[in-house]
């Protein structure tokens, strides 16, 4: 369906601060950006570049005082994510070269330390899509979704121990468990229609049967209507706003609605 | 200033045809896309990728019958292009690696055949920016701007002989003459405010003193208020619409206006 | 088989000259560089970068006087090129994004002007591999291999008219004819075992049935034992030595032998 | 000087295992590979690709039984590393786009947790090169070089606490401390002449005054004669041999000698 997404960040800033944003969705195989708006108030110089993972990044040196970022877009996306229990495990030696970084450990996904947990979860499961689905279900069942227990330093291993977290933590754990079995997995940030409470969201993708599939451990059922903002190895790669100094985020406002008829 | 640009292409299509478009301006160092809209009517699947030169390309397999592409954007750009007569020639051995392709001949810019003409134009001119400006002025003075004499196969060499052409031909000639003196030059397509008659436009950039400068041989004076759609070696790289089959373009409509106050 | 290749270039140089070389073969899917040597005499600073097409390029600012470049390598390659008459034509809308540049015209391959010739050659031929093979055979039969008639400015269209040329011209014509039918084709330079007379060589590849196949219009039969030095759209992209100034090549020496047993 | 480097890995392998190697040095701005050899015994198919950081990676699916990798090269490198106490701190807003990833935390470099330590080390030091040199000296003085205390999971934070480690740990700590002050830092692996005991080595680079400088916290004095094998954010990016399964490394042999006169 056509989704109208929007995100507004309002800052109070004492000193000018370098800021990198990833708030412009990019058209690609799975989504088409029909309409888009990106406003800085007050208006300041801004440049855009593409990072190593193909994400569009906006660089700005903020003014001091009040500073607002207002982005909105209408994006055409699939109502349903693809689900395919027959999608098979791809042996490492047959993976495309560019998938290999997604089976290595990364900052928040210590896959090198989570092999035992992964093995216990998938003990009696067919290799391939079913394994990732088992991981996803296990996280959904065994990790409590609750704010305030994790923070920007919390890793997959931390979450495996605490058993509490938010979408970011659920996704890191999913990624790390997949990688511990040599299944390429990447971290995704974006918007999800009818997410409650509404916010920016994180989920993960796994590479199976020659393509990437979407998995969301925070949900009980497969759900489409997602708009991707950025892909990466984990949250360290895809922070939607990375500030290099002190900036106080005063309010953040996110909305995902059906796009109005044109 | 903030420019409201728009471009509409209306096709009549007998059979479904693969089509690659380059109609989405990209934010970068010199321009910021505040707002943007990209509509296909009827709506058909479309994907987007980045080409070798960093341009955004839209791929679509058209429907048959009527098909319209409607793009518009509000883009913040500089009112004036930078002019710097002190920008010096950069010796080949000091050029950045990624500039080297821009001193080689390409499909429409046979720089290997235009050395004599370039030498005669810049005979008594200081090396560097002044040389490129001399080339630009020479083209502006000596080539007649007239539609109907050149076509999609016309090259810089053809134009050097015929002395007639349009913006595309003027730019190819400028690019080829620069390259024949080992000055990196690239072809640019985009929008120019107050272009008469209004249309999509082509100009060129030359690399001098460590950065790219804008030159437009169709104009008598330096003019800013340009929105870049794509960069390339010549028109072969940056065709705004490349169709792989028969499609009849019925109407094309381009507008560049000051953006309305928000 | 394992081939021992070598190439030596001896220059006489009046003034120091920027020079870009593409003489280092790269390991990849089809070849493995077991051993390699790359000497400049006298020794001068040299850097290496990767161009847009993935080729390794060596940049040097030559000394004046005598200057020699001596490269050699032992490379493991396939004895036979793959031949598959069932490899089908891939419709443009199904091509990978990075193949699209290889169906556009380029400096020496004016595919936009050679559609009629291509159509006549493949008039009664099955689409796909057979078409490319028909083109290859037509060139081999109808173009006379002879030195001295073509030069660095000769294009596919020139060769289609003159019907005389060398390996570079044969390959440009093959590339251009394929592209005129929307078959991706790229220009290849490298070494061929038992080429007579021995020299650096050029051939082309066409994308069919989801992969690249090797074609060599200078040969009557398919032959393997090739070492690739560089890929590109045409010779403008893959000049093995591009000099930006006057340098006199005094001797050039190329050898391809079976590698000695280790 | 011209260094003759070599590295041999001998494995005993029960089952065929995917393996990614980074053992082929690449010519670039700082080093020129004159001669090189790369042997697999027994010979098995191998491919090579370039990773996100520009490193050459060799992919092989090992045989079972005994398997040896033998690489050697003669590389021309600088006798001294550049030292420049006047190289200034580059504010984040002025960094090149591609430096930004090197100020973010990564798997083994939790720069987000080491700000206090960094601040205490550079408390009375001029910003820029001197800060990095202060960090380097602090590590050299305060971390004990000893094998057996750290392992493949040890991170910069771990080392900051344990105060014991090897070259990899020293470098991770240096990288993390630099990044915590917004100084881009990257992890380097390669060879160092006269390293005692001889082994593959790790050090780091920091971006100051518009270029990268070499720092080695394991050494008391600046030392040149280094051959770089790979760059990355930390050891997770540049493992010289990444095995995806069980393989027993039986012996590893590394040598760095002055190259014999030719």
Image (cartoon, coloured by chain):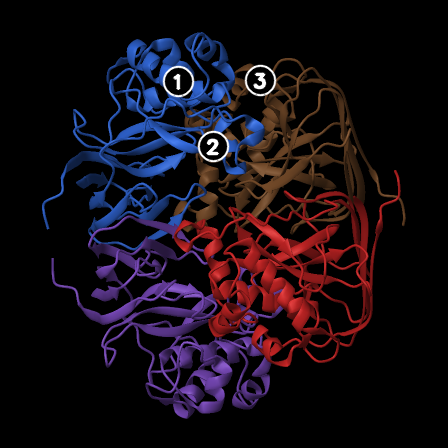
Chain colours: A red, B brown, C blue, D purple
Q: Which mark is residue D26?
A: none
User: Is residue C243 shown to the viewer in this render?
Assistant: yes
Q: Residue at x 76, y 60 (%)?
A: A44
Nearer the camera: disc 3 or disc 1: 1
Disc 2: CA contacts within 10 A as few (<14), some (14-19) or many (>=20): few
In the rendering, at what x and y percent does residue C34 appear? 22, 50
Q: Say which of D56 and B99 sits in front.
A: D56
Residue carrying label 2 = B123
Residue carrying label 1 = C130
Q: Residue at x 26, y 75 (%)?
A: D199
SS label for mark 3: loop
Q: Is residue B145 above or below residue A138?
A: above
Between discs 3 and 2, the one toward the N terminus: 2
Residue lying at the far front in this picture: please name it: A124
Nearer the camera: disc 3 or disc 2: 3
Tell which subunit mark 2 falls on: B
Image-quadrant location for residue D152? bottom left
Q: Distance between the Cα atoms at labels 2 and 1?
A: 54 Å
Q: Residue at x 24, y 20 (%)?
A: C221
Q: Is residue C223 above or below residue C2?
A: above
Image-quadrant location for residue D38? bottom left
Q: How many marks?
A: 3
Residue carrying label 3 = B163
In the rendering, at what x and y percent does residue C12 appear? 21, 39
In the rendering, at what x and y percent does residue D41 appear? 19, 56
Q: Residue at x 46, y 50 (%)?
A: B96
Q: Distance between the Cα atoms at labels 3 and 2?
A: 20 Å
Tell which subunit mark 3 falls on: B
User: Is residue D208 shown to the viewer in this render?
Assistant: no
In the rendering, at what x and y percent does residue C248 appear? 24, 35
């Amino acid at each position: 369906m056509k989704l109208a997404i929007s995100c507004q960040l309002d800052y109070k800033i004492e000193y000018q601060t370098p800021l990198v944003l990833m708030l412009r969705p990019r058209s690609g195989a799975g989504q088409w950006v029909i309409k888009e708006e990106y406003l800085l108030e007050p208006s300041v110089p801004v440049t855009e570049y593409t990072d190593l993972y193909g994400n569009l990044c906006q660089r700005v040196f903020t003014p001091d005082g009040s500073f607002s970022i207002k982005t909105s877009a209408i994006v055409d996306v699939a109502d349903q994510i693809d689900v395919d229990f027959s999608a098979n495990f791809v042996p490492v030696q047959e993976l495309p070269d560019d998938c290999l970084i997604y089976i290595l450990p990364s900052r928040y996904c210590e896959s090198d330390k989570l092999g035992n947990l992964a093995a216990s979860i998938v003990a009696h499961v067919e290799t391939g899509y079913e394994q990732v689905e088992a991981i996803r279900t296990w996280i959904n069942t065994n990790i409590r979704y609750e704010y305030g227990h994790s923070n920007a330093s919390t890793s997959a291993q931390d979450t495996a121990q605490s058993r509490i977290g938010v979408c970011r933590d659920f996704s890191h754990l999913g990624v790390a468990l997949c990688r511990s079995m040599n299944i390429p997995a990447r971290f995704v940030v974006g918007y999800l229609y009818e997410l409650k409470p509404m916010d920016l969201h994180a989920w993960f993708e796994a590479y199976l049967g020659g393509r990437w599939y979407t998995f969301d451990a925070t949900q009980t059922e497969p759900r489409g209507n997602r708009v991707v903002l950025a892909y990466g190895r984990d949250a360290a790669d895809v922070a939607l706003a990375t500030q290099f100094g002190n900036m106080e985020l005063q309010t953040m406002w996110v909305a995902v609605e059906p796009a109005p008829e044109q």
